[in-house]
Image: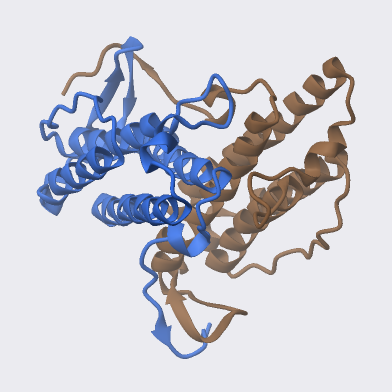
Chain colours: A blue, B brown
Amino acid sequence: MHYIVWIEQFSGMLQRLSHCLTQAETHAAAQGFDVNSLLQERLAPDQFPLVQQVQVACDNLKLMAARLSKTEAPRHEDNESTLAELQERIASTLEFVKGIPAEAYADADHVQVSFPWLPDKHLMGPDYFVQFAVPNLCFHLTTAYAILRYKGVPLGKQDFLARLDFHPGAAQN
Amino acid sequence: MHYIVWIEQFSGMLQRLSHCLTQAETHAAAQGFDVNSLLQERLAPDQFPLVQQVQVACDNLKLMAARLSKTEAPRHEDNESTLAELQERIASTLEFVKGIPAEAYADADHVQVSFPWLPDKHLMGPDYFVQFAVPNLCFHLTTAYAILRYKGVPLGKQDFLARLDFHPGAAQN
């Protein structure tokens, strides 16, 4: 599976997170509370709150795309304090990722990735992608969704999954 | 990326879920409560409880491997009522998946997949994998972890992620 297929899939899933946040806004308006109060909610005292789950999910997608395509990533300050600002963060992330052409991932299998917290080691591109980038992105997308569910936002699996390219006819194998 | 690389990655992540359940057992023993009481915990009244999150995660991996390799999957009755039985369910799933050789996925790109809830349509193997199977598996692995976090089990990201194949030396690109 070419990297670009996954990048497009995860871009679709980040769009679904944006949709879930919009659902939260509708829910808050109907219930008469300030939707921004949800940003500091979390499931455990030592867990990132919703605002940080969304920021990290955005950075997971941004950095996955940037590293594997050797494209410089735009800097984000992690200073969002409203749901509207989180929506802008998502939009900015999606715009950056969409601007990277499929050809830019041609050398992704040979990219080396180091992290600030372990600077003298590296992962090869495919291991970075499969073992680290994808699990982390899915983790934060799901945890953001879980916090919204926990706070009563009416959501279901269909709000989490992105596009499904069905074809007509029962499977023939 | 060959399917088998992903299957091995997700097998590793299901093993980590088993590890998280073991952590829950240790925590329950230290706190003096019955660990099996966690099985019915959930984050929202209309969400699957922990027991079902684990069952579905197991089935997501089992069916992803079975469908893409055209291997018949073993049947599981979804009748687990203790954490020990959930651990057996995970072990049985991992054993099945491990028994499928890499060559069995050779035709995965041309497999067609239908679902009982939409029997007259199908997804092609790659779309099934990227759009449905992987997001669902990651969703249920993360939600099981989130429920454990919510109930106070001491866990962190390192308990969720599987193997990371680091090489010595800073990245050179």
| Horizontal side of residue A101 vs B94, given as left or right | left
Residue at screen point 86% across, 57% down:
B79
- Does the rendering let one see residue B114? yes
As displayed, is residue B141 above or below residue B31?
below
Residue at screen point 16% across, 39% down:
A69
- Does the rendering let one see residue B100? no
Q: How many numbered dots are placed on residues in this image?
A: 0
Image quadrant where one finds the N terminus of chain A: bottom left
| Horizontal side of residue A79 vs B101, given as left or right | left
Residue at screen point 90% across, 30% down:
B34
As displayed, is residue A173 above or below residue A83?
below
Give the image location of residue A123, x and y in percent. 34, 25
Residue closest to the eye, B118 or A15: A15
Give the image location of residue B152, x and y in percent. 69, 25
As displayed, is residue A134 above or below residue A4?
above
| Horizontal side of residue B18 vs A141, given as left or right | right
Q: Quadrant of residue A73?
A: top left
Residue closest to the eye, B160 or A5: B160
Residue at screen point 58% across, 38% down:
B13
Give the image location of residue B134, x and y in percent. 48, 54
